[in-house]
Amino acid sequence: MATEQQKVVHRFKSPFDVETAAGGEGWEQMYPYYFRFSEENREWEDGMLWYQDGVHHPEVLYPFDTITHECWRTALGQYNSRIFAIPPAYGIEQRIVNGYLYIAAVPVSSEQRMQERVEVFMRRAGNYYQNWDQLFDRWKIKMTDLIEKLEKLEIPHLPRLESDDIVMEARGISSGWRLVEAYNTIIENMFEAWQYHFEMLNIGYAAFLNLFMFCKQAFPGIKDDLIAQMVAGSELLFFRPDDELKRLAQLGLDLGIADKLRSPRKPEDILADLRHDPAADKWVESLDEIWHPWFYFSNGAGFYHHHRSWIDDLTVPWAALTGYIDRLEKGENLSRPKQEILDRRERLTSEYRELLPTDGDRLAFDENINLARLVAPYIEDHNFYVEHWHHTVWWNKIREFGDRLVEGGFLEDREDMFFMNRWEIGEAFADMVASWASGGPSGGQKIWKKKVAERKQIFSALHEWAPLPALGPVPEEITEPFTVMLWGITTERVRSWLGLGAAVAENEIQGVPASPGVAEGRARVVLSSNEISLIEQGEILICPITAPSWGPVFSKVQAAVSDIGGMMSHAAIVSREYGLPAVVGTGTGTRRIKTGDMVRVDGNTGMVTILPKQ
């Protein structure tokens, strides 16, 4: 039920009143029960505000792909509620409606309980803050060790007869058991990766939140983007793949192979030829040196199996590479304006510090600024290790289990496994191994092919349904910190969904000012990574949300606008680091703006204006 702190003034449709998408009947059976709204839990579920998670899960969820958000449901929640005891917030609950993920922040509604948590948080988080760099170094070792274990994982076939070695070496364990063991191991590996993912993340965001809260109180009326600029200028790991492409572009020019790199053929074919070209030896050697891990970079956010990485599809990095060659030939400087960003950071910090009346205030300000800058690299860098490097290896390794299901006659194609959830695949392997062991027939060979065929039709129908932005009652104020900073879900944003926001002109779209500056130019609407290669120099990027591997785009466009995200979303952070005006959380930018429209992006006010046609 809504608490007194969450006094309801308006509400969206109840999740229990949402109609099934036409043609999508039976979608519920694709997902585990705990992801579905239930009559048993109706009183609580119908009293919460649920919003569609467009930041991480904007697409219909393949049944198997629910594993990524299942991992973060547990990991985020445990670190908030049970480990670091972040005072104002427990975890984030998840439910699926018509294939789309909806989430709700669980607040700490008791003031007494909140105060009890403060002491625990200060002591436990303080230990991490005091030893941040050393703990981050240990964290990297834990993640790389986990990736190495994943790479070495062997997925056995089920032979007609086991080899003599089983007997002669007295192994005592069959290939069937090893297959089941391998599947359990790879699932546990994913969950362990997400345990590490949130080990330092929530308290990292808490450090940002402390800075924002201090500044809001000390400097009434200060804009969020000005506070964020005081933390900008970190040397982020996410820039490394893009920097390597720029280096390869320069090397290609130096070696005289630029035209070969720009050949109008598939990148994989070009690279295959270069490996036999003496003139390209140094270039290929350089590529091979940085291939692992810098090309383990997902073209999406890493949450979906079909978001392939650079190592799987060279289209995106090759387009950036050849674009950089063109720009270098014109004498352009490809460097990010890092010094300019650092100068602005120090100027803003100094100016606001001077406004503080006491030494104590200035000391508190310094501590908050320094802590936020300390944790800033981890906030972005952890994603490279988990969602990109680890997940690239993991998704490709999991496909080998799809091969085994094909070999066992349970599926027609390895990709069909993604229409089964993780529990169902475990059932299928249990059945397949038992049938292999006994020599008897298995009904699973017919059951799963039939179910997958039905689910493909359901899945197609769900794609035609437009998810509602939110469900349930709207509290008077939305204050949960991560909801606001990462997802950009604010009281004003939710009111605008209800048509209650401040009126704007017909050609205007109000969003969150994420990176300062004003730019005018031709819009390029990009709905997926497949369209990145269409972006032309000087255009303004209009997208649902950006992915880290889109880094090369930010040196090409002059401003960015996203439908989704808050002040600490990826689009906001990277735009600030590139010195680009940016507006995030517009909600409707990609629907209202068309490629070719002239637009003005005001990163100071959060206003995007569609200009009259010339």
Image (cartoon, rainbow, N blue to C red):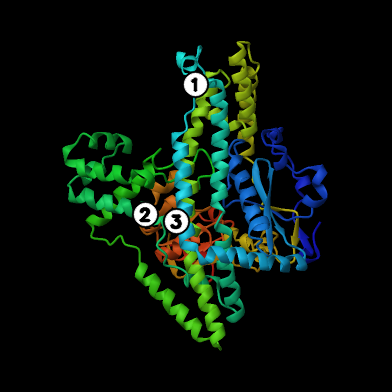
Q: Nearer the viewer, mark 3 or mark 2?
A: 3
Note whether 411 is above or below 122 in the view shown: above
Q: Which residue is mark 2?
A: 240
| Three-letter code for the amino acid on which mark 1 is drawn | His
Alpha carbon separation for disc pair 3 and 2: 18 Å
The residue that appears at 23% across and 60% down in the rendered structure is 331
Alpha carbon separation for disc pair 3 and 1: 38 Å
Q: Nearer the viewer, residue 147 or 499?
A: 147
Query: In screen coordinates, is 14 left or right of 469?
Result: right
Note whether 248 is above or below 435 in the view shown: below
Note whether 349 is above or below 291 in the view shown: below
Pick the quarter of the image with the C terminus: bottom left
Query: In screen coordinates, is 467 left or right of 608?
Result: right
Q: Residues within 10 Å of mark 2 (few under 14, many from 20)?
A: some
Q: Nearer the viewer, residue 402 or 183?
A: 183
Which quadrant of the figure has residue 498? bottom right
Image disc number at residue 137:
3
The residue that appears at 53% across and 83% down in the rendered structure is 362
Quick one: SS at disc 1?
loop
- Mark closer to the chain start, 1 or 2: 1
Image disc number at residue 157:
1
At which x and y percent is residue 168? 46, 15
| Three-letter code for the amino acid on which mark 2 is drawn | Arg
Quick one: SS at disc 3?
helix
| Three-letter code for the amino acid on which mark 3 is drawn | Asp
